Amino acid sequence: MHQIACHECDLIHEIPPMPSRAAAVCVRCGCVLFRAKNDSIDRTLAWTFAGLVLYSVAVSFPFLAMKNGPIGNETGLLTGIEFLYRQGMIPLAALVLLTCILIPLIQMLGLLYIFIPLKLNFRVKYAIPVFRLFKHIKPWSMMEIYMLGILVSIVKLGKMATIVPGLAVIAFGILIFVLNFALSAVDEHMVWEKLGGES
């Protein structure tokens, strides 16, 4: 059993372990405190493993190829960041590196670090700080914005040269959805309940 404050009226509730898909409601204002998610551990792990595979493809394979007559140029996600850095756009390169490379990777590794032990029912050190870090960096994953920028660039550069999307851009696009599915499958209250019981 753990305590939770209502988001609307701040009334403190004692919440017992809940069955999947059940909802906890504030007894004073009727606000839904949270809904227990079905198979949260299994679904989170499945989406996270799928995300890691897509992430590996997105980082390792060519992102875009640009052909203008006999001249062709191919670039990847990391080489694009390096190009920004060499052009003197260091803050932009750092922002892309942080939001599109590091934070998604930290999120997925953090989910595996927390959810694999939960699945196997054993205690792991630093699980609570890792889950707090996961919650803090969650809003900083901005792959959707980067993908939107790429699409705009493809449309604009398409008038000057032939743009060929690589395997990585497809994997990156799918990764955005897969990572969102993984994040939405996380049942935070179940995690706190289990981590609190282990500590």
Image (cartoon, rainbow, N blue to C red):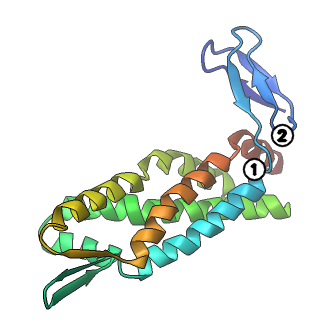
Query: Is residue 122 at least partly visible in the picture?
Result: no
Residue assigned mark 1: 40
User: In the rendering, at what x and y percent does residue 30 appear?
Assistant: 71, 12
User: In the rendering, at what x and y percent does residue 185 appear?
Assistant: 67, 49
Residue in view at x 70 percent, y 22 percent: 32
Left or right placement of residue 4 versus residue 136 in this view: right
Amino acid beneath label 2: Ser
Dots 1, 2 in contact, CB < 8 A: yes
Above or below — where is 117 with respect to 5?
below
Q: Which mark sits nearer the N-terminus, 1 or 2?
A: 2
Left or right placement of residue 46 versus residue 63 in this view: right
Q: How many marks?
A: 2
For mark 2, give the secondary structure. loop
Dividing the picture into quadrants, the one containing residue 45 is bottom right
Query: Is residue 98 at least partly visible in the picture?
Result: yes
Amino acid beneath label 1: Ser
User: In the rendering, at what x and y percent does residue 26 appear?
Assistant: 73, 16
Residue in view at x 74 percent, y 64 percent: 116
Above or below — where is 121 with respect to 161?
above
User: In the rendering, at what x and y percent does residue 2 appear?
Assistant: 79, 32
Query: Foreground: 174 or 10?
Result: 174
Residue 19 is marked as none
Left or right placement of residue 125 versus residue 72 in this view: right
For mark 1, give the secondary structure. helix
Residue in view at x 36 percent, y 81 percent: 62
Residue assigned mark 2: 20
